[in-house]
Amino acid sequence: MQKQYNPLLWNAIFAVILLGLGYGIYAASKSIDYTWRWERIPQYLISTDPTEIRSPFDGTVVVEQGGKRVLVDPDSGDEPFVVEKFDLLLADDGDIVFEGDAVAGIEEWRLGPIGWGLLTTLKLSVVSLVFAMVIGLFTGLARISDNPALRNLAITYIELIRGTPLLVQIFIFYFFIGTVLDLDRFTAGVAALAVFTGAYIAEIVRSGIQSIPPGQMEAARSLGMNYVQAMTNVILPQAFKRTLPPMAGQFINLIKDSSLVSVIAITDLTKAGREVVSSTFAPFEVWFTVALLYLVLTGALSWAVQRLEKRLAASD
Amino acid sequence: MTEHFDPSIIVARDVDKIYPNGCHALKRVSLEINRGEVVVIIGPSGSGKSTFLRTLNQLETISDGDIRIDGISLTDKRTDINKVREEVGMVFQSFNLFPHKTALQNVMLAPMKVLKKSREQAEKKGRELLYKVGLSERMHSYPSQLSGGQQQRVAIARALAMMPKIMLFDEPTSALDPEMVGEVLDVMKSLASDGMTMVVVTHEMGFAREVADRVVFMEEGELVFEERPERFFESTSNERLQRFLGQVL
């Protein structure tokens, strides 16, 4: 007999434990006299500060058409600097401005440093993921090939990558390979992540293919399909379905591992977080925010994979 | 082009098969099969009958000897084995339908990918074949939604879609519940009466007696005895065959 749990009671207990943990964090921060300043965070995600338009030289401000047009008359007597599209007037008629002083501002929303970091992390992950899947697919196929050269190359690659830390690989890619091939830091970061994740995907691909009964390949070949046709039409679609759950785990790891490229000065979400901490002195808020943003990325990914799994389950 | 006048479509000569682990699965097996002939191979398990069948489309390679399919030698390095396999359909004990495709898609796949037929042509042929095996109603079902007998009939239709000259059957009814054996054997009988060349490994002695032109008995990798069915089952000359028939009949 399976034990029956009262769902209401135990869900309530779950909620109480979560609330307790939340209160614990709050109490802990109280005990160290931490002042929470959540209001400082949003501007680092999306900045609403007006973009300032600065005078290119020293001169005198002239406001025309009832404030719809601003120009700066240079002291040198050259052509004036004219600004027609702006939202805020930052100088008065007759003001004397120096080169670099703000004369007007445009109100617009821009990504703040953390927003940019999030975008960089997203770009980094997507590009590495595409390359990692290609590397992983071909390495996985080579791994189960009858050709000893292909097979041993695949095994060597997989063992080398799995046996060394990603952080060390990133340094090698940036300082050694990056220098030899003259790669910029983003390319080096993508290469390191793709090569690292590719090794793990190769093993997932291998186990996926090997989990398909050999009769499937025999049936396909007995119909006259060659190896490539049998793989692409029969084996890989089935293996893909079976490997989706471990694949999703690997993709999520890739997003999280991408935080390590901040060590080669790519301003991803983690590095942006570090920079914002040093200018706000609000480390708790910033790191919680950064963690939440990673969670949004990985959560969206696992949601998408789960939907795909449901759709592919039609033939079960 | 004299081969068209050659009555034999399968010629196996002194076929030897030794597995890397030393197991001697086939010992100098020779067999000639004519166009339109139905040959049933029987024998105890482990006798090499399935192995022999699988050498005929090179799912198993052979260690020695030669096999010719419609005049083309399988041991010749210049032979494109995929071209030969287009002509030799195979039906497996465990059906081996593609589980991610519907019955109709299973039948359409190889003609489209291998023979480069258009989707319309492949679908027309697919519907025709599924009608022939009595599964018009179920053509949009996935294999998991079909019974064993239905799956095996789809597998036969799938092999027929390549318009093969030869059909190989590897214990096609052994994995079926007893009540489904009949429907598969009926399809095979109608195929035989259409003049298809068939090589059938089976334990269905009734089928052998009724449909076969020739019955072959194999044991321990050797082809022991071959005879027309009406004489095969009455034959008392061969002691090994007597022992086997005594066990299964």
Image: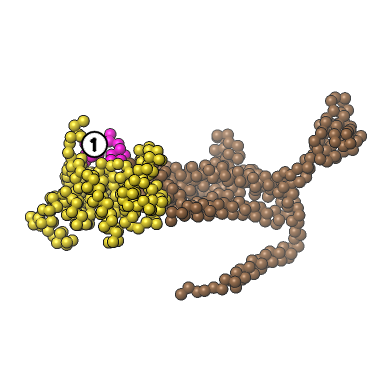
In the rendered image, which quarter contains the C terminus of chain A?
bottom left
Magenta-span inclusion, residue B86: yes
Residue A260 visible to an observer of this rendering: no
Determine crowd level at label 1: few under 14, some 14-19, many 20+ residues with C-alpha closer than 10 A: some
Residue located 64% across and 52% down the image:
A293
Q: Foreground residue, B164 or A44?
A: B164
Where residue B109 sits: x, y (%)? 38, 44
What hue does chain B carry in this figure? yellow
Q: Is residue A74 left or right of residue A218?
A: right
Q: Is residue A88 left or right of residue A259?
A: right
Q: Foreground residue, A225 or A134?
A: A225
Q: Which residues are magenta?
A: B65-87
Tell me the quarter of the picture where residue B160 sits.
top left
Magenta-span inclusion, residue A27: no
Q: Chain of mark 1?
A: B
Q: For mark 1, what is the residue? A: B72
Q: Foreground residue, B65 or B143?
A: B143
Q: Which chain is brown?
A: A
Circle 1 SS class = strand
